[in-house]
Image (cartoon, rainbow, N blue to C red):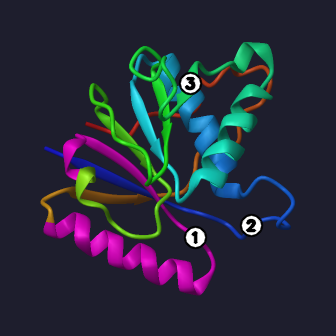
Amino acid sequence: MRKVTFYLLPASPPADALAVQEALVCDLACSLWRQDQRLLIACENQVQAYRLDEALWQRPLHRFVPHALAGENLRNKAPIEIHWPEQPLSSGRTLLIALLPHWVEFSSRFTQVIDFVPNEQALKQLARQRYHAYRQAGFQLTTAEPPPSLTDDDHGKNIQPPSD
């Protein structure tokens, strides 16, 4: 059965910092990769994709995450692909981390999806619409609090993928 986990997010820090949601995506990508997951991170736009790409490159060596931006020659070899709407989709991934404001039909290609419910009211309403769309598409839905932030010495062991 296809499943979606919606993480309930706290308020975001100032605009110049990496958003809470984006920081959590980096932590999730690290943990899921260490569990041999191949995933697609679907960003809202190219700017967000490049911001996540840079954030993943800035991680400490023991939390390195092999990844590629959509359109790069290594995208089918990298276990994590960062995608934005103007780029064609690749295949071979079963888990989607969705940062998109609206549900997209290609979500149905994945057996597991991670989505987010932001704290801001307008964004929360968009999350409700996505929740409804996933349900209409036949996904099993759950909500959860985000896992605790990773520390430099836990090496991603405290984040679990959505349950099967």
User: What type is the residue that disc 2 sits on?
Assistant: Ser
Within 10 Å of disc 3 (Cα), the crowding (few <14, some 14-19, many 20+) is: many
User: What type is the residue that disc 3 sits on?
Assistant: His
Quadrant where the C terminus sits is top left
- Across and down, in percent, residue 80 comes to 48, 27
User: What type is the residue that disc 1 sits on?
Assistant: Pro
Asked which secondary structure carries label 3, the reply is strand
Residue range corresponding to the magenta coloring? 108-136
Q: Which mark is residue 118?
A: 1
Within 10 Å of disc 1 (Cα), the crowding (few <14, some 14-19, many 20+) is: many
Q: Which mark is residue 12?
A: 2
Tell me if label 1 and label 2 are in contact, CB under 8 Å: yes
Asked which secondary structure carries label 2, the reply is loop
| Residue at the spot 60% in from the left edge and 64% down from the top edge | 9
Residue 17 in the figure: left or right of residue 155:
right
Residue 94 vs 51, above or below: the answer is above
| Residue at the spot 34% in from the left edge and 47% down from the top edge | 113
Q: Nearer the viewer, residue 49 or 71?
A: 71
Q: Nearer the viewer, residue 123 or 85?
A: 85
Q: Quadrant of residue 140?
A: bottom left
Mark 3 lies on residue: 67
Quadrant where the N terminus sits is top left
Mark 1 vs mark 2: which is more N-terminal? 2
Regarding residue 148, the answer to whether it shows in the image is no
Regarding residue 74, the answer to whether it shows in the image is yes
